[in-house]
Image (cartoon, rainbow, N blue to C red):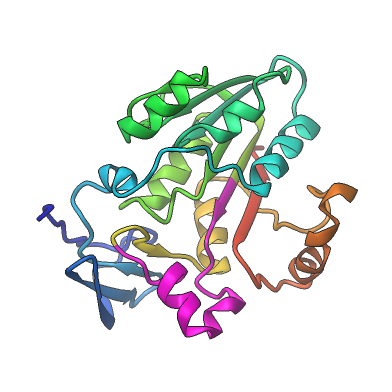
Amino acid sequence: MPSRATRQKCPICGESRFRQKFPIDRSGERFHIVACEACGFIFVIDPPADTASHAEEGQQLVWRFRSRHEQIRRLLLAHLKPGASVLEIGCGRGELGYIMRNDPLSYIGYEPAHGLAEFGIAAGVNIVREPYFGGMSADAVVIDNVIEHVTEPALMIRTAAESLKPNGLLIVITPNVDDIRRLSASWRQKYLWVPPDHINYFSARDISRMFRDAGIIDRRFRFSPLTLSDWKYFPRAIAECLGLSILGHNVFGVKN
């Protein structure tokens, strides 16, 4: 059985007082979901000690391209000049890097799960097989469906912000604890409360706080990053303009 760790403090605000919400049994183990008494952030208090290796368990390694990869690519191309550098933290197989291979941008991804990283490397994607702890300087940083998996999500956001050049672009995509689809019990069981895979559950307020603490003002999905090719996302964008995060979080911001 993989070793477990106990988080002593809220990974967003640092508070050490938690309110028990409920236990959940997954993958033959029991996990405990709590809410921070200070900021309300919801997270698994006893996740696996290694939150990277499980990403490879039970997976058949094939490309898993999603519409969001193309949306991220278009957002990067709209904001960056030719020759600009893109850093992706937790790039997985490297789908984004693969579809950007002919773009006039420099891409590098970091991925600690070696099987996933090797898959992308074999296809020619520029991937470093280790976690990213900072030290680089990039025009854009992408964190796509990663912060829900890691024990220190706010630290990851701050590290990403510190790696940005002035006027650099930060893009973060992650599930939403207030997703309207949570009204379906089957959806919650399959996509929401799923430790040891997802160990953090973010509200819009949590995302805004992490961005603000990192010195970046978050911008919601809205219309600005959308093109006519994204017409099916317009209802969602309208909701975001009204301050309603009805599905997942698609957030970006520019470093001052």
In percent of the image, x 43 and y 70: which residue is there?
A: 190
Residue 179 visible in the shown view: yes
The stretch drawn in magenta includes residue 176: yes
Q: Which residues are magenta?
A: 172-195
Q: Furthest-right residue in view?
A: 228
Left or right of 192? Residue 184 is right
Q: Quadrant of residue 115?
A: top left
Left or right of 46? Residue 140 is right
Compared with 70, 185 (above or below) is below
The stretch drawn in magenta includes residue 134: no
Compared with 243, 184 (above or below) is below
Question: In which quadrant of the rendered image does the N terminus lie?
Answer: bottom left
Left or right of 177? Residue 58 is left
Question: In which quadrant of the rendered image does the C terminus lie?
Answer: top right
Q: Position of residue 221 (x, y in %)?
A: 72, 57
Q: Position of residue 135 (x, y in %)?
A: 41, 23
Left or right of 42? Residue 107 is right
Q: Quadrant of residue 110?
A: top left
In percent of the image, x 61 and y 78: which residue is there?
A: 180
Q: Position of residue 124 (x, y in %)?
A: 52, 17
Compared with 212, 23 (above or below) is below
